[in-house]
Image: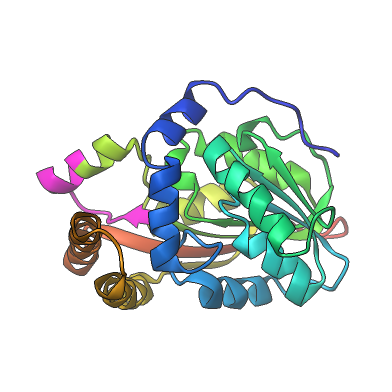
Amino acid sequence: MVLAHSGAGADQAFLDSGQYTRESILKYELVYGVNFVSPGGKRCAARLIEKLDLKPGSRVLDVGCGLGGSAFLMKQKFGLNVDAIDLSDNMLELARLRLTEAGLAGQVSLYNQNCLDIEAKNAYDGIYSRDVFLHIKEKERLFAIFFEALKPSGKLLFTDYCCSEGSWSEDFTQYVKRRGYHLCSAPEYRNLIKEAGFEVVEAADVTKQFIAFSEAELKTIRTLDIDENVRESLKTDWQRKIDRARTGTQRWGQFLGVKPSENTG
């Protein structure tokens, strides 16, 4: 293993006691689908993994793996070798159970790891992440670490919650503050990736897709056979998310960068 061993500290406690309590994770999974806690669920994950365009046997780092859905899919459908990391103990506890249930014990590696402490060098053919970097303030450092961790011609692919380039409403400002998010606009992400040394293949605002996913998920919420108060709370949260995206305050970005090959230049 080429990842550093690290204590997660206060950030881990913040996640596990706030947005990612065990109860919250299981509620999210009801909406996104079994083993998934990110927009679009399994179908979106499969499309993005295909976008990495990696050969079977390639090595991938899944950053913020959550319940492990994408990592399991990488192994089962695409034949990739996956190191999957997350900072949340609650996520990883459930992911390890799901790994065994999927019959993948020993085939996908799960680690409690802060991605800012990764020490890998030229180790991965791909790095994949879904809506995780909003939790990370030190983005310049993050992308420098990823650049070092990838092999020449390795690919970085991620989606993330983004903000607009304009001023924020008071409601959106308070939402971001409550969540402890550190948001960038899509153009800011493009610059960060480029400055880290990547060739930027894609830096797209895909908010329309996010709205479509969220509207479908809201329909799912309405059909859930769960406590009425829990269902109503989820409906409210999802409708607010849709409204923020429709007004343009909250955006969703999709990004693909490639580390130049050794003979580039």
Instruction: Locate the N terminus and report the quarter of the image it occupies.
Output: top right
Residues shaded magenta: 161-174
- Is 53 displayed left or right of 232 in the figure? right
Q: Specify the quadrant of the image occupied by residue 103.
A: bottom right
Q: Nearer the viewer, residue 1 or 209?
A: 1
Q: Quadrant of residue 149?
A: top right
Residue 39 horizontal side relative to residue 91, left or right: left
The residue located at (57%, 54%) in the rendering is 67
Say above or below: 76 vs 130: below
Rendered position, 4 above or below 101: above
The reply, left or right, for residue 142 in relation to residue 207 is right
Q: Nearer the viewer, residue 264 or 23?
A: 23
Quadrant occupied by the C terminus: bottom right
Q: At which x and y percent is residue 185? A: 36, 54
Identify whether 262 is placed above or below 8: below
Total tally of numbered discs in the picture: 0
Q: Which residue is found at the position 71% from the left and 40% from the top?
A: 111
